Image (cartoon, rainbow, N blue to C red):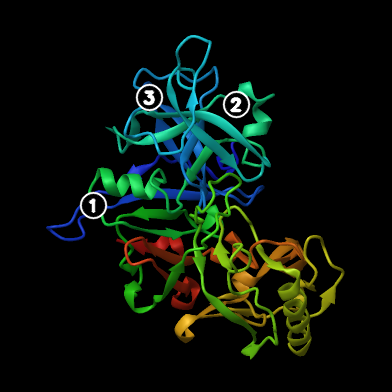
Amino acid sequence: MAPHSSSSHVFLLSIALLSMSCFSLSPFILPIGKDPKTLLFYSQVSIGTPRHNMDLVIDLGGPIVWYDCNTHYNSSSYHPISCDSKQCPSGSFCSGCNGPFKPGCSNNTCGANILNPFANAIFTGDTGEDALTIARTKVSGLLTGCTDSEGFTGESRVLQGLPPSAKGIIGLARTQLALPTQISSLFKLSRRFSLCLTSSNKYGLGNLYIGASPRSTVKNVDVSKIMQRTSIIVNPVSTAPISSEGEASYEYFIDVKSIKIGGKALNLKTPLFSIDKKGNGGTKLSTMDPFTKLHSTIYKPLVREFMKQASDKKMKKVQSIAPFEACYDFKSLGRTKTGFDAPTIDLVLGNGVQWTIYGGNSMVLVKKNVACLAVVDGGKNAMTAVVIGAHQLEENLLEFDLVSNKLGFSNSLHLHNAMCSQLRI
C-alpha cells in the first residue's frame, strides 16, 4: 500500500504557471509529501510514454535523478545516452546488455552510478533521456539514471529503506545531473531552488520550488524579511560512496562555529566544526537522515546541558527510547506557537547569524505520552561532525542560491503563524 493513500494525497510533479513578473519565467513547483513510516519525503512524477506515475524520494545530497526500470517498465520515448556523447558525464563507465532493448538494457550506453544511502551499496544503471510529464506537458531533455532492480537479487536491494511506494530518488545536490541544475538549464531559470518540508501531510504538502522562492505567507508576511543567510561551503573531499581522487563533496555544508542551548554556549573545545584536509568534520544538511546526528564529542555535552535546562523547566524525564536518550513525559511539557516549550538549540554560524531550533523541531513524539530530544549519537568515528536531519528542517523555508553559494533560512515558520503549505509565490 502506498504510504500516502490513507491521507488521500495523490499528486503529480507540476509546474505552477504563476508569473513572478511580466519579464520572468514561471518557477517549477513540486509538491512534497512525508511518509509517516520511514519519515522520508517524496514527490510523485510521471515518466515515459505511456506515463508511469512514480513516487521518488527527495535527497538533498543526491547527485542524480534515478528510477527503477525493471521488467514492468517500458517507454517508447526513452533514448539511452551513448558513451561518446557530450551529454555523458566525464568519468562515466560504458555499459552494455545482452537482452532485448528496453530502458535499462542497451549497448554502448553511458553508465550511471545508482546511489541509495540505505542500501550500503552502489548499483549500476544507464543514463538516458525520457519524457517527463509536467502539468500534462512532456518535457524533453532531462537526463536520468535507470536501473533494473530485478537484476540485483530482488527489488529490496536497490530500493532498500525507501517507502513502499517509492521507485527511485530525486537528487538535489550541486551536480550537473541533479534536478534543480537540469531544470534551470533547460528552461533558462535562475540557478536557485527552495525547499520547505511539511511536518505532516495532514497539515498540507510541502514544496520544492525551482527557479524562484516563495514571496509571502497566506497571512501576507513578507518572506524576504524573515530570511537569514549564510554561506554554503565546499568540503574539499568527497563524502560520496564513490568518487575520484581530488573530487570535492557535492553535498550542502554550512559553517557552524558553535552551539548554544537555551542561550548558553556549550564549552566544546573541539576542531570538529571545521573541515580538515581529509574531509572530516563540518556540518551538512540531509533529508535522508530523519534526525540530526552529532559526533559523540558534541552529542554528549549537548544532551547533558539540554537535560539540565529541561529539569529547570520542570520537564519530567522518563526512560530513554532508542535511539533517543533525553525523553520526557508528554504531560509535563509546555506549549508555545513553535511547539513544545523546550530549551532552544542555536547553531551559531559565520558573521554571528544564528539558526534557532525550537521545540517543534528539537523534540519528537515517539509514543502517545513520551516526547524525546530528536538528536542521535553519530559515534566517535563520524566523518561529518553535525548532520542536520529532516526533522529539524521541517516547517523551515530553505533557499539554495547556487550562483552566490548562499543558504537562506527562515527559522520556524510557526513564529509567523505559518506553515510550508501556506507559502505563496
* Residue that carries the numbered disc 2 in the rendered image: 149
Q: Is residue 236 left or right of residue 89?
A: right
State the residue position of label 3. Answer: 82
Q: Is residue 303 above or below residue 51?
A: below
Q: Which element is circle 1 on?
A: loop
Q: Nearer the viewer, residue 169 or 276?
A: 276
The alpha-carbon separation of the residues under discs 1 and 2 comes to: 36 Å
Which residue sits furthest left?
Answer: 22
Q: Is residue 355 above or below residue 264?
A: above
- Mark 1 or 2, closer to the camera: 2
Q: CA distance from mark 1 to mark 3?
A: 32 Å
* Residue type for callout 3: Ser
Q: Amino acid at mark 1?
A: Ser
Q: Amino acid at mark 2?
A: Ser
Residue that carries the numbered disc 1 in the rendered image: 26
Residue at x-position 61% and y-position 89%: 263
Q: Earlier in the sequence, mark 2 or mark 3?
A: 3
Say above or below: 149 vs 261.
above
Rendered location of residue 90, percent (x, y): 41, 39
Other-residue count near label 3 (Cα within 10 Å), few / some / many at <14 / 14–19 / ≥20: many
